[in-house]
Each structure stands twice: as C-alpha cells, then as structure tokens.
Amino acid sequence: MDIRSEVVSVLDEVLSLKGRATAFSLDTPLLGALPELDSMAVVALITNLEERFGFCVDDDEIDGSVFASLASLIDFVHRKLGS
Amino acid sequence: MALEAFFLPATPGQRFALLHWPERACEVGGAVVYVPPFAEELNKSRRMAALQARAMAAAGYAVLQIDLLGCGDSSNDLVDASWEAWLADVQLACTWLQQRTGAPLWLWGHRTGCLLANEAANRMQCVVDQLFWQPVLSGKQYLQQFLRLRLAAELAGGDGRRVMELLRQQLRQGQPVEVAGYMLSSGLAGGLEKAELLLPHRSGRVEWIEVSNRPDAGLSAAAVARLTQWQAAGQEVRGTVVGGPAFWQTSEITECNALVQASLLAMQRAPAP
C-alpha cells in the first residue's frame, strides 16, 4: 500500500480539496495553514484514517504536531502501522 | 410531487415536519420516515436527505422528515433532548404517517439515525423495513468522535490532552458540555453511549448502504461482520456500497447521486427468497 497517496486521497476527500492535495509536497503545512482543516475536518480525518488503515487512535495521541504538515501526518500513519 | 411543511403537536411542544407526497396520492406504494443524523452531520446531509425524499416521492413513496426535539425548527434546545425523547419522536412520526396512509412502513436512518430507527423498529407492533445510510454501529465510539471535536479545536494551542478527560468528568457529574457549538446534556450523551446497532427483532428487511470514494471499495470490515452475524440469525439484510463523497462530513456540501439511485433500487427490489 502506498501510504503517501492514501493519506493524500483521504485529505483531499475530507477537506473537499478537489484534487489540490495531489500537488502537496511533504513540507506543505496543514494545521493553521489550510482553512479547510477546522476541528470538524480534523476529527473526520482521524476517523477516515482509522477506517482506511484499520488502526485505532487514542485520545492522547491526538496532538497538533501530527497535523503540522503532510510529512508529519504520513509519519504518524507509519508509526501507527508499526512500519 | 407535493410538498407540505407543518408542525406536528408533540410532548413537549411541536415538531417541524416536511412531507413529500407522490403526484397521484392514490398510488402511495410505501410510507417512509427519515431519521436524521446528529449535530453537524445533520446539517451537512440536509441536501442529500432532501434530494432523496424528492426522488422517493417521485417513485411513489410518501416521505416524512421531522426535526427531532431540540433540533432545527422543533421545540426546545438541543440541551433539552434525550435519547428516549428522540425515540418517542420517531414513533410519533411513524404513527402520524400511518394514519395518513396504510402503505407499508420504512424507516430510513442516516448515521446515528440508524441507531434510533433500529431501536424504534424493535419497539413497534408492526413489521417495518429499514434503509440504513452509513450506519453508526456503536454509539459509544460515535460519542468519542463527537467529543474529539473539542480536542481538535484546542490543538492549535492550549492543553488539548486534558480536554477529553474534563469533558467526560463533566458528563459524569450530570453537567452538559459544549462541543462545536452544540450543548450536549449528560442524559443525551448517556443514551447515545448505550446505543448499539443490534440485531433487529421485528424488522422486515434491512437495506444497508455505505458510501466510499475508493474505486475498489467494499463494505467496511465492521459492516461485513455485523451483516454476517445478522444473516446467520435469520435476519434479511443486504449490504451495498456506492461510490461518492462522505457528504455528511465533507467540508463543502456535497452530493452523492449514486446513493439516491441505489436507495430506490434497494427499496424497490423484491425481498430475497
């Protein structure tokens, strides 16, 4: 499974970015930089990542730094998958 | 197709209701009560619910949508709502619609609305068919996701990590909590937390539809497990996946026409032998 493209596709769908997410680079800032990423979208993003990758996120794992950039979000998914 | 907007007398107060009716009233082939999702998911899915209600009416169904207690234009505020009061509202809507038409009854639930519909169906004296849109299986898990909205709102700064603990503490103490502009009473939170999508006792068939944007999508693993369990217990249930956006949670209001068509098809096809 290509984790980066899966994460990008979840981002694009949840935030209604209409394909803009495919142009994101690893250091594209997310939280605080993307107006679409409000609290609703953060929760939807977590739920969708849980469903897409089949892991379970604990409350205390949810931290601003996870959503800082595309790279940090992908890192988080890698950590959760234990790879 | 005829559209009627009115208030249904209820206890307490009244409920705002929308009735879609087929062009030729004598041709009502089914009576459908829509049971809406919760909070922001309700707002995000209003357009899809309206599109579906119109499509159902055009296909010969009478469709009743009501705003539950404390929601939309119905009486009181959300903080006054309880799970039991919402179940009573679903029952009220069913009774009212059945007085208008003797056509077979369908409960059409969306997200947590499926939890309410399924419980309401269990309490009914008559057989009722159910249409589920992306059902929530566990009220407990849903409540956690809802409370996380507060956590997410405080991510940018503040002490996010203690937020969940504080919210749960407040609810345990019987106090309401405010999440994303919604005032949730401890009673409603408790009712939601206990709700589980369990095997229907008295339902006719259940048509279970999920929406996914992935081209190769199948039903979610959780749905497959539940469907298999119900089928083994003799419940008639069919699962379907359609392609489209998760319109109940996307940032923009989005549509999923495939879902409208799939829902009609699911309702109209003959029951499995």
Image (cartoon, coloured by chain):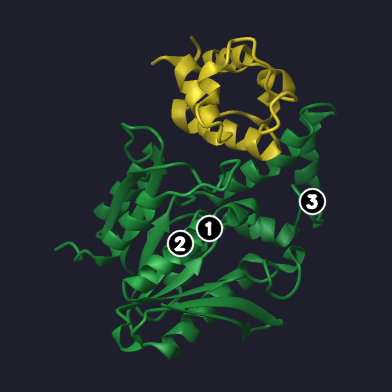
Chain colours: A yellow, B green
Judge from the rendering whether residue B95 lies leftward or rightward of residue B242; answer left or right: right
Direction from residue B77 to residue B222 in the image, left or right: left
Q: In the image, what residue type sits under mark 1?
A: Arg
Q: Which residue is labeled 3 in the image?
A: B178
Q: Residues within 10 Å of mark 2 (few under 14, many from 20)?
A: some
B28 with respect to A19 (left or right): left
Q: Position of residue A71 (x, y in %)?
A: 60, 12
> Mark 1 highlights which residue?
B47
Residue that label 2 marks: B51
- Label 2: state its secondary structure: helix
Q: Earlier in the sequence, mark 3 or mark 1?
A: 1
Could you tell me which chain the residue with mark 2 belongs to?
B
Residue occupying the point 64% across, 10% down: A27
Residue B201 appears in the picture as rendered: no
How far is the residue under mark 1 from the one under mark 2? 6 Å
Q: Position of residue B230 (x, y in %)?
A: 31, 54
Q: Residue furthest right?
A: B158
Q: Position of residue B58 (x, y in %)?
A: 35, 72
Per the model, the C-alpha gap separating discs 3 and 1 is 26 Å
Q: Which chain is mark 3 on?
A: B
Write down the chain letter for disc 1: B
- Let me know if residue B187 appears in the view: yes
Q: Residues within 10 Å of mark 3 (few under 14, many from 20)?
A: few
Q: Is residue B67 above or below residue B137?
A: below
Foreground: A44 or B46? B46
Q: Are marks 2 and 3 in contact (CB under 8 Å)?
A: no
Mark 2 vs mark 3: give the one in front.
2
Disc 1 with disc 2 on a shared chain = yes
Based on the displayed image, in which of its 4 quarters is residue B189 positioned?
bottom right
| Residue placed most toward the observer, B107 or B233 | B107
In this orientation, which residue lies closer to the viewer: B16 or B128? B16
Question: Pointer 1 and pointer 2: residues touching (CB < 8 Å)?
Answer: yes
